[in-house]
Image (spheres, helix red, strand yellow):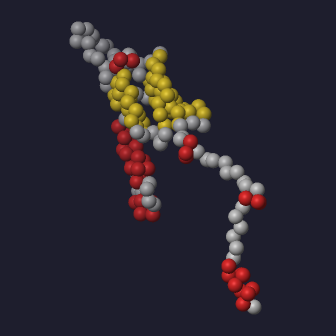
Amino acid sequence: MNRFDFTPYRRSTVGFDRLFDLLENNARAQQSENYPPFNIERSGEDHYRITLAVAGFKDAEIEITAQQNLLLVAGNKNVEDGEAKQFLHMGIANRNFERRFELADFVRVDNAALADGLLVIDLVREIPDAMKPQKIAINQESNVTKIVDKRAESEGKAA
């Protein structure tokens, strides 16, 4: 595993602790997590889609929880005791899972749908109006306050 040392960056930056923690935790989690497989797509400037392959799960067995900066998708497969099955080969994973996705600020879940064994979660980033770039109108010269350099005036009177 490639391991990055963020110590030099931590010493020279302020307020990026969360980012460095996310990178380190993600590197650790990448080793153990590989189920269920998923895709992350960007479908527009502020629109994203996560698609998870959850074959065999019903929508009642999947729980999606959105918290601040975290999306948690958990699948709990109901074990049916009444049916004793003898598998000759079991190639379809039939186990519980928990998948975590760190979300950027102002990203929220817009929609979730389960069809054909694929769980599709649509995300949208909505930046508040107060944080969006604003156009500043340029005033006419008559409205501009003129700044007078008092040093230049006092030097002219002294001469």
Looking at the picture, does residue 116 appear above or below residue 107?
Answer: above
Quick check: 66 left or right of 138? left
Quick check: 27 left or right of 79? right
Residue 155 in percent (x, y) is at 71, 86
Quick check: 155 left or right of 129? right
Residue 45 or residue 76, whichever sits in front = 45
Quick check: 38 left or right of 159? left
Q: Residue at x 45, y 26 (%)?
A: 52
Looking at the picture, does residue 87 appear above or below residue 36?
Answer: above
Q: Residue at x 42, y 40 (%)?
A: 69
The residue positioned farthest toward the bottom in the image shown: 159
Quadrant assignment, res 12:
bottom left
Q: Residue at x 76, y 60 (%)?
A: 142
Residue 151 in percent (x, y) is at 68, 81
Residue 71 in percent (x, y) is at 41, 34
Can see residue 137? yes
Q: Residue at x 76, y 56 (%)?
A: 140
Residue 136 or residue 150, whichever sits in front = 150
Q: Exactly how many numbered labels are in the figure?
A: 0
Quadrant assignment, res 57:
top left
The residue positioned farthest toward the right in the image shown: 141
Can see residue 1? no
Looking at the picture, does residue 137 appear above or below residue 84?
Answer: below
